[in-house]
Amino acid sequence: LFPERSTDIGRLLSSYLEKESDVEDHSVHLLFSANRWEQVPLMKEKLNQGVTLVVDRYAFSGVAFTSAKENFSLEWCKQPDVGLPKPDLVLFLHLKLADAAMRGEFGRERYENGAVQERVLQRFHQLMKDTTLNWKMVDASKSIEEVHEEIRALSEDTICTAVQRPLGELWK
Ligand code: 2DT
Ligand code: MG
């Protein structure tokens, strides 16, 4: 789960997201990336043991959220995360803004407002055009059981094919 809020960098990020502190935009982008890189040794250890990793948010959130800010290009935002372990499947759980806003505590943390979310969504759509990644869109407005079933089916297929493939490098 990213950001991993329990590390030193993670605590900075958590306080930033909770609006308890402000951090310069470039700097916070690099901290989000560093917060992923510091988990890479553990992620690789697990993957080598044959453990399947389910990662909630990853470099894609990093790029989508920062590039939604003014004067940040998609290319610049991707650079710090180039070479991270490449996911075998990337699920985009799509939910209309109005529905998302009705879910728990929306609006409390930084970025949780309509204008930002719409710009972030556009950036995600740009990222999804990248055919070197296995993007799948899931309709998150369905019931928990239906969403679960869809994710389970997609994941099982991916796990079966991923076991015989080497770990890739993201955006490289
Ligand atoms: P949740 O804990 O509710 O998922 O919100 N974010 C996340 C970034 O801006 N950059 C990143 O690299 C990552 C991983 C998106 C976390 C918030 O943090 C933002 C929403
Ligand atoms: Mg949240």
Image (tube, helix red, strand yellow):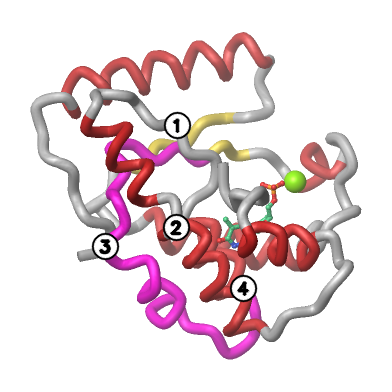
Range drawn in magenta: 68-92
**Is the CB atom of the residue marked by disc 1 within 8 angstroms of ligand 1's nearest atom?**
no
| Residue drawn at point x = 26 percent, y = 22 percent | 159
**Circle 1 sits on which residue?**
54
Q: What is the C-alpha distance between the residues marked 1 and 3? A: 18 Å
Res. 121 image quadrant: bottom right
Which of the two residues, 76 or 129, is positioned nearer the viewer here? Answer: 76
| Residue drawn at point x = 66 percent, y = 48 percent | 6
Query: Which of the two discs, 4 and 3, sits closer to the camera?
Result: 3
- Residue at the limit of the structure toward the front, as seen here: 8
Mark 3 crowd level (few <14, some 14–19, many ≥20, 10 Å Cα): few
Asked if the stretch drawn in magenta spans residue 74, the answer is yes
**Circle 3 sits on which residue?**
83
Give the left or right position of residue 78, taking residue 4 as reference: left
Res. 91 image quadrant: top left
Asked if the stretch drawn in magenta spans residue 121, the answer is no
Mark before the other along the chain sequence, 1 or 4: 1
Mark before the other along the chain sequence, 1 or 3: 1
**Circle 2 sits on which residue?**
38
Residue 5 in sight: yes
**Circle 4 sits on which residue?**
68
Mark 1 crowd level (few <14, some 14–19, many ≥20, 10 Å Cα): few
Mark before the other along the chain sequence, 2 or 3: 2
Does dot 3 land on a helix, a strand or a loop?
A: loop
